Amino acid sequence: MTRYRTGSGLDAHRLVDGRPLMLGGVQVPFARGLEGHSDGDCVLHALCDALLGAAGEGDMGRHFPSADPRWRGAQSLTFVAEVARRLAASGWELENADLTVVAQQPPIAPHASAMRDAIAGALGVEAGRISVKAKSTDGLGAFGRGEGIAALASVLLRQDG
Ligand code: MG
């Protein structure tokens, strides 16, 4: 019997001076970067939460507690690879992941293909299973004012057997 499970994830981080902007596992040229205990990559954090949620495995806070010095300054691709390893151990395979970046600036579209490749590499799947889209909020709200960047993730997992 094949089982399917969907999961969704949401994350947002504040933009601050003096940090590189990491999004979807890619360094995007920009004057500011995302604040965070790790590299602040909200796209990958939303993805990890969606994957863990679909598998009924809680959330990132449970698997990668910020109080644990192992994860201080960690590259978020490390989290993605570790989540993928834990799900694979339970027989879960990724059918697809659909990611949306909410950012007024910088433009995301020129980097979407590199993000897909980086994410697919960390998950060990072909890039065709990963979608990266971008939305501005037409200047509305905190994200429209450029105070931060948010990301949404939807995933479908499959378990055969
Ligand atoms: Mg986060």
Image (cartoon, rainbow, N blue to C red):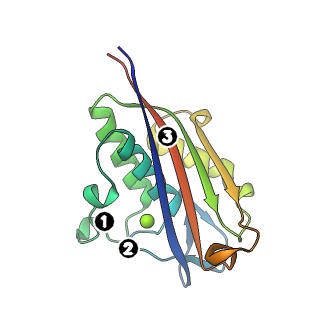
The amino acid type found where label 3 is placed reads Val
Quadrant of the rendering where the C terminus is positioned: top left
Location of residue 159 by image quarter: top left
Is the residue under label 2 in contact with that under label 1 (CB below 8 Å)? Answer: yes
Label 2 element class: loop
Kindly identify which numbered label has been placed on residue 37.
2
- Label 3 and label 1: CA atoms lie apart by 24 Å
Q: Earlier in the sequence, mark 2 or mark 3?
A: 2
Q: Is mark 1 within 8 Å of ligand 1?
A: no
Considering only vertical position in the picture, is 94 above or below 44? above
The residue that disc 3 covers is 155
In the rendered image, residue 160, in percent from the top left (x then y), is placed at: 36, 19
Residue 71 numbered tag? 1
Question: Could you tell me residue 156's position as x and y percent?
Answer: 48, 34
Residue type at mark 2: give it.
His
Above or below for 134 versus 6: below
Quadrant location of ligand 1?
bottom left
Task: Name the residue: 37% across, 54% down.
Answer: 79
Disc tally is 3
Q: Earlier in the sequence, mark 3 or mark 1?
A: 1
